[in-house]
Amino acid sequence: MNRFKLFLGFLGIALISFTILFNSCAKKEDNSIKVGVILPLTGNLAFLGKPIQQAFDIFLEDNREYFEKNNISFNILYGDSKGNAGEAVTLANKLIKIDKVNILMPFLTNVSQAVSPISQNSNVFTMALCTYPPIVDNPVTVKLFYDFEKESRIISDFINKRGKKNILILKSNDAASTYQVDKYFEKYITQYKIKFNVIEFKLGNKDFKNIIPTNLNKYDCITVFGFGTDFPEIFKMIHNYGFNFKEKLLITGIGTYEIPRTTPYDLIKNVYFTAPTYIVDNKPQFEEFNQKYAQKYKIKEIPFMSVLAYDNLIAIRELIIKNKSIVYKDGKNIKEELIKIGVFNGISGEISISNYGNGSSGISVVKFNNSFESISKAN
């Protein structure tokens, strides 16, 4: 009898221990968040992917104490797409099926487009690190990079206020730039009754002799849309063809912010361009991040995409803080809950999230004055 009671006692203790262990494991599983990030870490576009990885590493350092205090396992797994859509598809399948990530973060428009059907079929929440608006048609995807429509409206207003009526549009053939010009920019300048001519160039092109017309001064304004890496050669050719910068106007999209490190000042001193407002507003959160990034990676000017990408992780942290009951297994539900946040403060300033999952933050028209470090709002 005593042995039977002793056996029951041991059995009870074992059941209690098993229950505690099971609940503990379940709780740990519920609090586990794996983010699969697909970046070009090698190849021709590695210079775009590496800064984002560096920014994400800073995020983990900045938030390690919070995650540990709240018993949250937050991990980032990186995959190298080399900027190739095919590589990205393979990586996405591996990250979802083998690594069991809760969240996907593909970078670049072509990569995000390729990964989109996979994340939808697997119901894995996706934060597309790209500028292509239709990507949010996917029910599990949001896009918190800058807003093309707002930028197009700002540039159009600026051109109209300067009295320009005949413009040349130079645009890259990448999907994002094509969408911006076709869908938004042409619409706004048409409303102002501004004449325009569109010339397309291949992304990564280095020879613009047969692309840019020699009679540029028949236009009173030139606009350029695409990646900033293409712009130095474009500006050089425009100068060689004698475009009158002082009397006319050259304004570019947000990609221009990347060119100070690669372009002689004489080529850009009279260029107006759009940039994230945080660059000229001296917000303390950006200044702190800028200083931390510069010290850690010995870089004087941090790429703007690092900041915008970092803000995507801030959005996830905001969701964790405001909705502690959410389980990171239902991509559609995560998107719905993130949209409910509406507005949050990132390094780039206040970011609003639309009902469709498009993010929008401040954009300004700015220009360089005398040196690359002196950036001010344009009149």
Image (cartoon, rainbow, N blue to C red):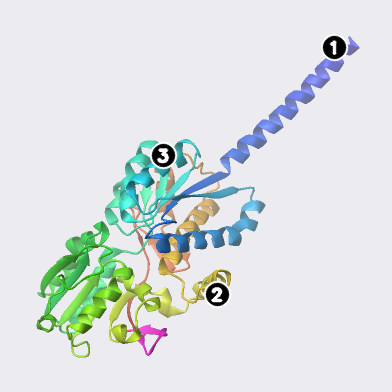
In the depicted view, which residue is nearer to us: 9 or 90?
A: 90
Label 3 secondary element: helix
Mark identifier at residue 4? 1
**Alpha carbon distance from label 1 to label 2:** 69 Å
Residue 105, percent from left and from top: 43, 51
Which residue carries the number 3 mark?
93
Sequence order check: which comes first, mark 3 or mark 2? 3
Q: Is residue 226 left or right of residue 91?
A: left
Which residue occupies 38% across, 78% down? Answer: 260
Label 1 secondary element: helix
Q: In the rendered structure, which amino acid carries the disc numbered 3?
A: Asn
* Residue sticking out furthest to the top: 1
The secondary structure that most of the magenta stretch takes on is strand
In the depicted view, which residue is nearer to us: 267 or 135?
A: 267
Q: In the rendered structure, which amino acid carries the disc numbered 1?
A: Phe
Mark identifier at residue 103? none
Which residue carries the number 2 mark?
291
* Quadrant that contains the C terminus: bottom left
Residue span colored magenta: 368-377
**Alpha carbon distance from label 1 to label 3:** 53 Å
Mark 1 burial class by Cα count in 10 Å: few <14, some 14-19, many 20+ = few
Sequence order check: which comes first, mark 1 or mark 2? 1
